[in-house]
Image: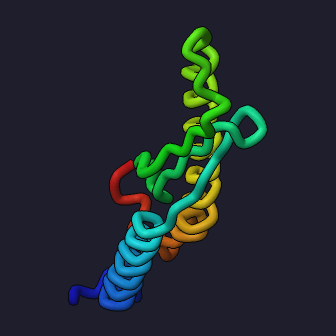
Amino acid sequence: MPDLGGMDLQGMLGQAMQMQQRMMEAQQELENTIVSGSAGGGLVTAKVTGTGDLVGLDIKPEAADPEDTETLADLVIAAVRDARAAADRLAADKMGPLAGGGMPDLGDLGNLFG
């Protein structure tokens, strides 16, 4: 590696590769984790992966009033939103430490482009 004022480019590359591996592992864990959200006091429960993909929807029979499908639709939307919020919190917990400042200090190299 070229000498750039004492900077260890090999070490920085190794750190970047380790961070990429940790991010890939965290992403895989999110894809394999199921979180749920509910609405209407548990009348409707939605299940999503940690990445936010809807994978299940449970509707209790008492929520399915044929005369009031609009309320059921609202409950489904609220349950999915609740589950997505749980997935977002999980992702922030898993990915936050990796996304927030994991790159090494670039020193003078950071000033090369502006």
**Observer able to see residue 99:** no
| Residue sitting at x 56%, y 28% | 77
Q: Nearer the viewer, residue 61 or 45?
A: 61
**Residue 85, picture quadrant:** top right
**Colour theme:** rainbow
Q: Residue furthest top?
A: 67
**Observer able to see residue 102:** yes
Left or right side of 41 for 21: left
**Residue 4, picture quadrant:** bottom left
- State whether residue 89 is above or below residue 97: above
| Residue sitting at x 34%, y 53% | 113
**Residue 92, picture quadrant:** bottom right
Left or right side of 100 for 1: left
Residue 28 x %, y %:
38, 71
| Residue sitting at x 61%, y 19% | 65
Q: Number of numbered discs present?
A: 0
Residue 24 x %, y %:
36, 73
Q: Quadrant of the N terminus?
A: bottom left
Left or right side of 101 for 40: right
Residue 38 x %, y %:
67, 42
| Residue sitting at x 42%, y 59% | 111
Residue 43 x %, y %:
68, 37
- State whether residue 67 is above or below residue 111: above
- State whether residue 58 is above or below residue 1: above
Q: Residue furthest right?
A: 41
Q: Residue furthest left?
A: 1
